[in-house]
Image (cartoon, grey):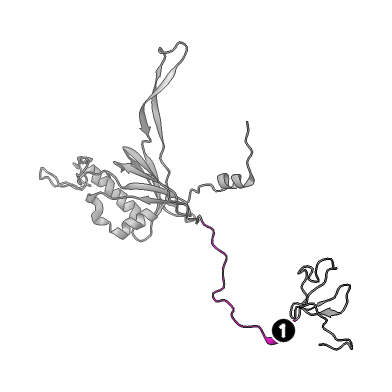
Amino acid sequence: MPSSKTIADLKTKFLKPALTSHYEVTIPLPEGIKSIASALDQADLNLSCMETSLPGSSLATFEVKNDYTGVTERLAHRRMYDDRIDFTFLVDAEKYFAIRIFEKWMRYIAGEDADREDGETLTTKGVNYHYRVRYPGTGADTTGYRCTDGLTITKFEKDMRNSLIYEFIGAYPISISSMPVSYESSSLLKCTVSMSYLRYVMTEVVKPDPTPAIKPQAAKADEENTQELPVAQKNESKVQDNPGNTAGPGTAFVETDSATGDRPGANDGPLLKADGTLAYDSSGNVQ
């Protein structure tokens, strides 16, 4: 049966969507190209990543047709990861760092900057220039061109409570997209880099709700008022609204003076003292 939902349930479930603009990228550099990048440059590179994507994957299946008559089953046998992930960087006007760092990284992969083992002196502009691609490197090998770990994309929200951390294993750049320039109206120069990787590992970070379980108590005054009332206010005579029948059983209701305790008699008769005697003498004077 369909279930009913309140407005509060809808607000909690559907009116707090995740936003695409809250993320953080960390791109570590291989040892061979760290010489041109300081820690501050690398932090600026991470911050300048203006666009990327969360990775996807799929399961490769094969068909089984002979186990059940008329039934075709598809069973999974391998998890398939995307072949690349794209990062778009804003290029700074001082160093063009995003372009320089990835060009350097790709030259390092191709071995263009490596010393010749045969002793021959060749330049990148020479007619007989050739190169040999470096070994990718694994584990503790720091001479390889792949990032064995550390390249991450962290997706979070404004409250910084929950986040998803995608860590890419064996990542390295495989292409730098062309960047058009023109004498027409100026626009931001962007560098888009495609990186290949072996697989990714997703880590879920869930923090407890910071809302306190116990409601805060009502605010109290810092100091209690201990000052005595003025004499005029202390002796103020007020008639109680409903103190009960103080005239005794079987009599009509009478009101009592809150200051003296005296009360008028039944049927609005003479004022009586608290002990029941008359408050006035036969001449009408107050006793």
- Rendered image quadrant of residue 35: bottom left
The percent coordinates of residue 276 (x first, y second) are 79, 77
Foreground of the two, 205 or 245: 245
Q: Is residue 179 visible?
A: no
Q: Quadrant of the C terminus?
A: bottom right
- Rendered image quadrant of residue 218: bottom right
Foreground of the two, 258 or 180: 258
The 10 Å Cα crowd at callout 1, few under 14, some 14 to 19, many 20 or more, is few
Foreground of the two, 25 or 118: 25
* Residue positioned 77% across, 68% down in the render: 244
Q: Is residue 228 magenta?
A: yes
Height in image: 237 above or below 101?
below
Q: Secondary structure at mark 1?
A: loop
Query: Is residue 166 rendered to the left or right of residue 132?
Result: right
Q: How many marks?
A: 1
The percent coordinates of residue 273 (x first, y second) are 79, 80
Q: Is residue 224 visible?
A: yes
At label 1, the amino acid type is Asn
The percent coordinates of residue 94 (x first, y second) are 35, 61
The percent coordinates of residue 148 (x first, y second) are 27, 43
Most extreme residue toward the left is 119
Q: Quadrant of the N terminus?
A: top right
* Residue positioned 35% across, 53% down in the render: 98
Query: Is residue 224 rendered to the left or right of residue 69?
Result: right
Query: Is residue 165 rendered to the left or right of residue 5?
Result: left
Specify start and end residues of the magenta stretch as a single range.
Answer: 214-236
Foreground of the two, 160 or 211: 211
* Residue positioned 38% across, 59% down in the render: 93
Is the magenta region chiefly helix, strand or loop?
Answer: loop
Q: Is residue 247 magenta?
A: no
On the image, numbered disc 1 is attached to which residue?
235
Height in image: 58 above or below 151?
above
